[in-house]
Amino acid sequence: MLRRSLICAFAAGPVLGLMLASCAGRDGKDGLPGATGSQGADGEAVGAGPVGPPGPIGKTGAMGRDGVDGGLNVSCLSPCHGFTGIVAQWQTSRHYSAYISNLGGAEVASWTGATACGNCHAIDAIAQRVAGNVGFVGTAGPSDLPGGKLRYISSLDQTPKESTYAGQATVAQVHCTTCHDVDATNDPHVTGASEYVTGTFPLRVATGKADQTLLERSSAVGVADGTPAGKFNLGNVCISCHRSRQDVTNYITASNTLSSSHWGPHEGPQADVYSGKGGYAYAGKAYGNSSHQAFTNGCVDCHMPPSDTNQGIGNHSFYAQLSACQHQGCHVNTKSFDVIGGQSAVRANLQELRVVLNTAGYLTRSAAAPYVALSATDLLDPAFSLDQVLPGAKNVPADIAGALYNYLLLARGSADGVHNPVYTRELIFDSYKAMTGTAPTSLPTRP
C-alpha cells in the first residue's frame, strides 16, 4: 500500500484546480499472515516461577505481487499541463501576472462591472462581444457593433460613446476560455478525451483569410464605422483587445480640453501601431508600413511561434521570441530586438518629441493633483509608457493634441518601433514638426 500511496500522491497534484485522471496500477493481494509463535512453558505452581522463553516468531507471510503500473496519463500533461506546457507558459505572461497582482484589489470590481473595462478584462470578455452582448448605459446604441468595435455614435445626442461590459463574470482574467471557444462538448476535462486533438479549441474571433477586426478609428467625423486593421488571420484575436479604445477621428476635435490624466489612448494600443492606421494623421500626409505587416498571422508570428515541446502549438507566454525573427529569414544573425540599432534610434526620436511636449506642459507622472511636469529624472527614464497627461489645458488645437495623442500611442504600443518602424517614425516626424515647426535632430528627414 505504501507504493501506491506514493504514486497517487504524485499523480493527484492539482493543476489549475484539476486532477490527473490516471494513477498507479491495481494493488497486489496481501500475503497470508505468518503462524503464531508457541507459548513458553508455565512455571511451578508454588509462587511465581520465572517466565519461560518466548516461542519462535512465526514466519512473515509472503507479500502480494504488485499490480501492473499504469503510469501517469501523458495525454493530460501534453500539450497543456506539462512542466513546460501551455499553462506553464501562460503563467509567465503579463495576462497572468495582471490577474495575480489584482486578486482582491479594487480594480477587479471595475473591470468586471458595468463599465467599458470588462469588454477586455473580464474572463468572458471576447465571448460577450462576439455574441453582441454589450451595454449602452443611458444611451441608445446600435443593434450591432461589428468587427469587435467598442465605440458608437449615440442616437440620442449624436455624440461618440463607448459600449460597456454586459456579462456577469466576477473574475478579471485573460484565461484559456477568454480566447478559445471551450464548452462541455470539447473540454477534455469534461469529456475525458484520451488525448488532445489539434483544432478542438477553436478561437472565438473569426480568423479566416478574409476576416478583419476593426480598429476604433472611423472614416469621418460623426460616424463610427471603424477601420479594418488588416488581414492578420490568427492575429485578429490579439487585435480585438490590444487597441487604443479611442476613435481618434472623433476624439481629436478642432479645440481640445485635457480633462484627465487618462486622456488619450488606453494602455496597450499595439494594434493601432502595428496596423499603421490608428494614429492621428496629419492633413496631406501619406503613411506607410514596414515588412512586418506582411506576416501571415500578424502578432502571432513573433509572439507565439510554434513550440516543439508542445505539439507545435504557439508559445503562450506571449512574449516576442527572438527566435521568430531569426528563423523567418529576416534577421538571421541578430542577437537582440535592437536590429541594426533600430530601437535605439526610435527611442532617441521619441525622446525628442517627449521633451517638447513636456516643455509645453502636457506630460506628468503625478498620481494625483497637484500635477507637475516630468522632472529631469523622469526625462531620463526610458520607460515612456509610464508618462501620462498633465490635465487642465484647454483650447488645444487639433494638430497639437494629435502630437500628444501620437506620443502616448507610440510610447505604449510601438515596442520602440519594432511593431511598425516606418509608421512609427512618420508619426514622430509629423508630430514633432507640428509642435516646433522643424524636424527632430535625430530624424532630419521624413521616412
Image: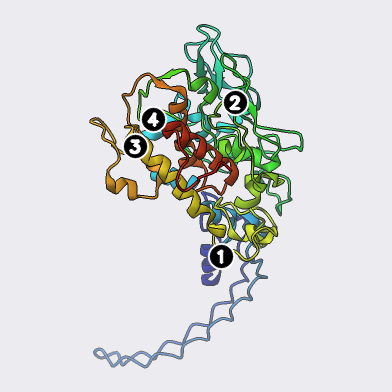
- Residue matched to label 2: 149
Q: What residue type is labelled 3?
A: Asn
Residue at the spot 61% in from the left edge and 28% down from the top edge: 148
- Residue matched to label 3: 358
How far apart marks 3 and 4 lie (CA) works out to: 16 Å
Residue 99 lies left or right of residue 424; in this view the side is left
- Residue matched to label 4: 262
- The disc at residue 402 is none
How far apart marks 3 and 1 lie (CA) works out to: 34 Å
SS at circle 4: loop
Q: Quadrant of the N terminus?
A: bottom right
> Of label 3 and label 4, which has the lower sequence position?
4
> Of label 1 and label 4, which has the lower sequence position?
4
Q: In this view, does 64 lie above or below 291?
A: below
Q: What residue type is labelled 1?
A: Lys
How far apart marks 1 and 4 lie (CA) works out to: 36 Å
> Of label 1 and label 2, which has the lower sequence position?
2
Q: In this view, does 346 lie above or below 12?
A: above
SS at circle 2: loop
Crowding around mark 3 (Cα neighbors within 10 Å: few <14, some 14 to 19, many 20+) is many
Q: Nearer the viewer, mark 1 or mark 4?
A: 1
> Where does residue 419 sit, x and y in percent of width and height?
58, 46
How far apart marks 2 and 4 lie (CA) works out to: 20 Å
> Of label 2 and label 4, which has the lower sequence position?
2
> Of label 3 and label 1, which has the lower sequence position?
1
Residue at the spot 38% in from the left edge and 34% down from the top edge: 107
Residue at the spot 57% in from the left edge and 58% down from the top edge: 339
Q: Which of marks 1 and 2 is in front?
A: 1
SS at circle 1: loop
Q: Nearer the viewer, mark 3 or mark 1?
A: 3
- Residue matched to label 1: 335
Q: What residue type is labelled 4?
A: His
